[in-house]
Image: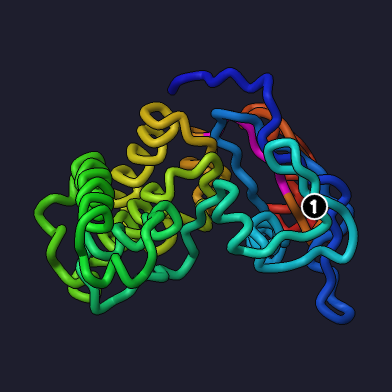
Amino acid sequence: MRMPDTSEILLLVQGVSLAFGGVKALRDVSFDIRKGEIRAIIGPNGAGKTSMLNVINGFYHPNHGAITFKGQTRAQMQPFEASRGGIARTFQNVALFRGMSALDNIMAGRTLRMRRGLFLQMLRYGPALAEEIEHRHRVEEIIDFLEIEAIRKVPVARLPYGLQKRVELGRALAMEPDLLLLDEPMAGMNLEEKEDMSRFIVDVNNHYGTTIALIEHDMAVVMDLSHRVAVLDHGVKIADGTPDEVKKNQGVIDAYLGVAH
């Protein structure tokens, strides 16, 4: 796996806390994501991992703390601001337009990059048509990259789960993100599908240079793919470092074995 130049911090999480009533999902969590790396966020169920991703891309607004992305610090961010700024996301449960084809779902990821007005796009005339053709070329490149040419015109509702996850990855890539957030990309997959998805995650990082932050329960996948790993438990960061450092950390071992706090 290519070792990135991680001298530049792309995203910085500083003292983030998040509560829902009396439930504290995150408590004073701080870490960074460096440009070009694959950064894993792991922890037992209920550790606050998805809540952390939701804070990063604006679905949740923290009670305390701040997020700095590409040098701009915000106490909170709206999802559309995150998308426009270069943050793309896939979800634990596949979130696709099930009646649309794989190609059209990926094409939806190009929406924020379209500059022509809605009226001209509906007419598909002149500059709007030329722009659509340009974006479709980009989408076809992604389809080739993800090796899903055979299902490009198939409605996603008819696709097996592993291919649906690949289409969702394609839609996120169509946004040309600086930071790609993957929420349990291997969830529900068999061994062959996990191997395929692992390969594509590494290829995205190598080929496009995309910085990736992922949540994943499969520790073998995490240790193979990640450059660095942050570990959460009950909303608190308990470890942070390379995969080798983290898997030897006694606090991490205790958390996964269910040792009482």
The residue under label 1 is 74
Query: Eyeballing the image, is 163 above or below 4?
Result: below
Q: Is residue 43 above or below residue 242?
A: below
Query: Does 142 appear above or below 261?
Result: above
Where is residue 190 shown, x and y percent of the image? Answer: 31, 57
Residue 138 image point, x, y percent:
27, 44
Within 10 angstroms of label 1, few (less than 14), some, or many (20 or more) residues? Answer: few
Identify the residue at image location x=84%, y=54%: 16
Membership of 230 in magenta stretch: yes
- Extreme front residue here? 126
- Residue 249 falls in image quadrant: top right
Evaluate whether residue 163 shows in this view: yes
Q: Is residue 224 left or right of residue 158?
A: right
Report the magenta residues as a range: 226-231
Return the x and y of residue 226 as percentages of the image width and height: 54, 34
Q: Residue at the location (37% across, 55% down)?
A: 110
- Answer left or right for 20 relative to 227: right
Q: Looking at the rendering, in which quadrant would you find the N terminus?
A: top left
What residue is at 31 percent from the left and 54 percent from the top? Answer: 166
Is 196 left, or right, of 184 in this rendering? left
Q: Is residue 194 magenta?
A: no
The foreground one among 157 and 8 is 8
Q: Main secondary structure of the magenta part?
A: strand
Give x and y (percent) for residue 83: 55, 55
Residue 25, picture quadrant: bottom right
The C terminus is located in which quarter?
Answer: bottom right
Residue drawn at (56%, 30%) of the image: 37
For numbered disc 1, what is the local secondary structure?
strand
